[in-house]
Image (tube, coloured by chain):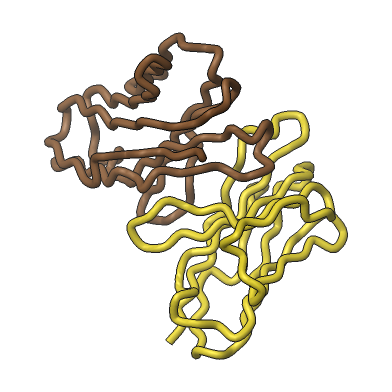
């Protein structure tokens, strides 16, 4: 499978714990995006990488959230001191420099904070 | 600020009926892209179509067709002869950041239910 992959697919954690999600984009894609989707809503943009550089961050990305893409390949999204409001589906997408407008989405990581 | 409105929260039709999903957008930019994505129960967003702001030609792909009208800021999606497999949540999205740098702005989605 050469699509975008995300791990884990599901994560249940207790409030106050830290969690980390991983996204592996399509191999030749240099752009990577993180979105958050809550129940009954469309995805909301969180942050964007071009290669290893984080070029854009939404105001939704509070200081408890941090994202990295150390070698311009896979990316991680960490949430520190999780809150119940962080419960959502976290989606990763990637696109190529050749066609930046077509974003391919992964299956998402569903986070439940109890 | 950009905004995408999908006023229909849920639509239920019987198989083989035609159905139209509405999308209205707001942007101050003259150059932008519009998209439709399908999200089946598995959760993965599936790309359906992209349209740029300079191309108002309607497009047909099999049973799917799209009607883009700049005058009314709408980009509606019609499924002809619907099938049960079309059941999903459909999202309309907008990119006016010149290449995705600000991500896509999505509507809230329309849950389409096709009954056998």
The residue at 62%/56% (across/down) is: A58
The image quarter containing residue B102 is top right
Image height of B58 relative to A87, above or below = above
The residue at 84%/55% (across/down) is: A52
The residue at 36%/62% (across/down) is: A39
Q: Nearer the viewer, residue B16 or A102?
A: A102
Measuring from the top left, give residue A87's x and y in whole percent: 45, 74
- Extreme residue toward the top, this view: B57
Image height of B115 relative to B22, above or below = below
Image-based side of A15 in relation to B12, left or right: right
The residue at 43%/87% (across/down) is: A114
Measuring from the top left, give residue B10's x and y in whole percent: 21, 45
Q: Nearer the viewer, residue B69 or B15?
A: B69
Measuring from the top left, give residue B31's x and y in whole percent: 60, 22
Count up the numbered dots. Answer: 0
Whether residue B60 is visible here, answered yes or no, is no
Please give the letter of the chain rendered in brown. B
Q: Nearer the viewer, residue A89 or B72?
A: B72
Measuring from the top left, give residue B58's x and y in whole percent: 41, 12
Please give the letter of the chain rendered in yellow. A
């Amino acid at each position: 499978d050469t699509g975008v992959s995300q791990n884990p697919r599901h994560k249940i954690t207790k409030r106050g714990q830290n969690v980390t999600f991983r996204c592996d984009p399509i191999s030749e894609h240099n752009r990577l995006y993180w979105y958050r989707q809550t129940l009954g809503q469309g995805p909301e943009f969180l942050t964007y990488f071009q290669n290893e550089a984080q070029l854009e961050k939404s105001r939704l990305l509070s200081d408890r959230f941090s994202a990295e893409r150390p070698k311009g390949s896979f990316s991680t999204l960490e949430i520190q001191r999780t809150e119940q409001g962080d419960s959502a589906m976290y989606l990763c997408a990637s696109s190529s420099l050749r066609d930046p407008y077509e974003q391919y989405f992964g299956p998402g990581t569903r986070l439940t904070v109890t | 600020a950009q905004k995408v409105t999908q006023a229909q929260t849920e639509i239920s039709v019987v198989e083989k009926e035609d159905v139209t999903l509405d999308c209205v957008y707001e942007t101050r930019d003259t150059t932008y892209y519009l998209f439709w994505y399908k999200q089946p129960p598995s959760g993965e967003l599936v790309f359906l179509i992209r349209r740029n702001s300079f191309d108002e030609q309607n497009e047909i792909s099999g049973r799917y067709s799209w009607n883009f009208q700049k005058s009314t800021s709408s980009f509606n999606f019609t499924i002809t002869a619907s099938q049960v497999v079309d059941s999903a949540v459909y999202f309309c999205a907008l990119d006016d950041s010149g290449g995705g740098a600000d991500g896509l702005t999505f509507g809230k989605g329309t849950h389409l239910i096709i009954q056998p």
